[in-house]
Amino acid sequence: QVQLVESGGGLVQAGGSLRLSCAASGSAFSDNVMSWYRQAPGTQRELVARISTVGTTNYADSVKGRFTISRDNAKNTVALQMNSLKPEDTAVYYCNARPAWVAPGRGSWGQGTQVTVSS
């Protein structure tokens, strides 16, 4: 099991940037697919970005070209650089870790960090 702690959320104006970070401990970080999800009030949690154990990335269509996910296996961290933020990006952002053989949406979760984008 992996323990995850997110940081970096906050309030930003539309068009601004934020960088989220997730620190992992407790298991072999490099063996885990790392993902960022988000959940806005009244909506289901949705996948924002994912990075595989070998660095392959996938993004939701709504964030392509604006967000970048990266991982540092030496530091057991995963980051989400968010640029050109929009009010619709407002949500609680969650870090997720799962071994490659575990289904998406399962595994370990962080406590979440709030991102608020004002118009």
Image (tube, grey):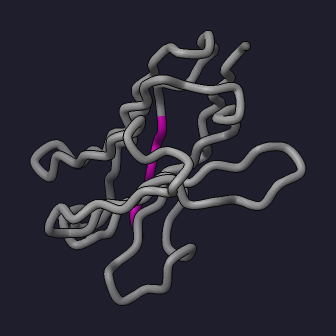
Residue at (70%, 59%) from the top-left corner? Answer: 45
Q: Above or below — where is 115 with respect to 48? A: above
User: Up-down: is 103 above or below 86?
Assistant: below
Residue sticking out furthest to the right = 42
Q: Quadrant of residue 118?
A: top right
Image quarter hosting the N terminus: bottom left
Residue 30 drawn at (x, y percent): 18, 65
Magenta: main secondary structure equals: strand
Question: In the depicted view, which residue is nearer to us: 32 or 115?
Answer: 115
- Asked where in the image residue 9 lies, by quadrant, the reply is top right
Please tell me whether residue 16 belongs to the stretch shown in magenta: no
Q: Residue at x 73, y 13 (%)?
A: 119
- Considering only vertical position in the picture, is 4 above or below 15? below
Q: Residue at x 20, y 69 (%)?
A: 53
Q: Is residue 31 above or below residue 90?
A: below
x then y, percent, for residue 64: 42, 47
Q: Is residue 119 left or right of residue 65?
A: right
Q: Is residue 14 left or right of residue 55?
A: right
**Residue extent of the magenta highlight:** 1-6
The total number of labels drawn is: 0
Q: Could you tell me residue 59's position as x and y percent?
A: 42, 57
Give yes or no for residue 4 being in the magenta stretch.
Answer: yes
Residue lying farthest to the bottom in this orientation: 101
Q: x, y percentage for residue 110?
A: 54, 50
Seen from the viewer's position, the closer of residues 15 and 38 is: 15
Give 3 or 46, whichever is nearer the viewer. 46
